[in-house]
Image: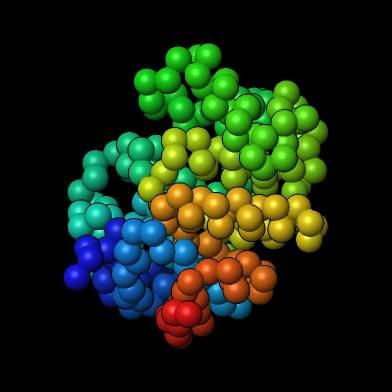
Amino acid sequence: MTEPLVEADTVSRYFVDGDVTAVSDVSFRIVAGEYVALVGKSGSGKSTLLNLLGGLDSPTGGTIRFAGRDLADFGDPANFRSSQLGFVFQSFHLVSVLTAAQNVQLPMFETDLSARQRRQRAAELLELVGMSHRADQRPQKLSVGERQRVAIARALANRPALLLADEPTGNLDSSTADSIFRLFDSLHGDGMTLLLVTHDKLLAERADRVLTMSDGRLLSDQSR
Ligand SMILES: Nc1ncnc2c1ncn2[C@@H]1O[C@H](COP(=O)(O)OP(=O)(O)OP(=O)(O)O)[C@@H](O)[C@H]1O
Ligand SMILES: [Mg+2]
């Protein structure tokens, strides 16, 4: 059997604040190269689960493994993130004092790229998401959908093995969303593993597999 790239084993996340179990006993495996959509109603625990998978938060129960290794053993989670993982936050988390191009370069500071290579790679990524013309703007000057596209470009900076994205097309008009869908298809074609949280039926339909959450639990796991 192929070793899973990501494995959630009876994962739970309880928040004392609000006394809520946002993720409850969730188990699944994702093998390298899969394209997975994570869907479910608002409040069902999708972002909480994605944050756990990305090492941004720790489970209160269960284990998450990346390539067979417990995330809790990775040491500084930032190292794991910059080398293995691209993360698109639901609220983008762009750095407001940096331009779009500088935001895209941020993860590259963890690598050996020269300043020139960083600039060039950021320019290529902004081109991919249709944002070349706004490269020198700071986030406040960008529309919400433009910020979202910069956040996607930044997540791709270090060619991650795994892309985790929380509602990556949530703020885009249908034609811009369509170009981002095609970008995801081509990343998937190049071997990237994708796990995308989405309310967008059209995006979920492009995935090979759909995980559905309800009240913190995994309600269904359907492959096409
Ligand atoms: N830091 C936190 N502290 C307390 N409760 C939290 C925290 N984060 C999330 N929750 C709660 O956990 C539940 C799941 O939230 P989560 O953000 O994971 O839902 P979601 O499926 O991503 O929803 P949406 O589609 O609206 O983004 C909600 O009831 C939420 O209030
Ligand atoms: Mg969410």
> Residue 17 location, x and y as percent?
47, 65
Residue 45 in view, yes or no: no
Residue found 47% across the figure and 74% down from its top: 209
The N terminus - image quarter: bottom left
Residue found 24% across the figure and 45% down from its top: 74
> Residue 65 location, x and y as percent?
26, 59
Residue found 72% across the figure and 40% down from its top: 130
Q: Is residue 30 above or below residue 87?
A: below
In the image: residue 173, left or right of residue 63: right
Query: Which image quadrant is residue 119 in?
Result: top right
Residue found 66% across the figure and 53% down from its top: 180
Q: What is the count of numbered marks?
A: 0
Q: Is residue 87 above or below residue 32?
A: above
In the image: residue 131, left or right of residue 45: right
Q: Is residue 133 above or below residue 163?
A: above
Identify which residue, 50 or 126, lies in the foreground.
Answer: 126
> Residue 211 location, x and y as percent?
47, 76
| Coloring basis for residues | rainbow
> Residue 135 location, x and y as percent?
71, 27
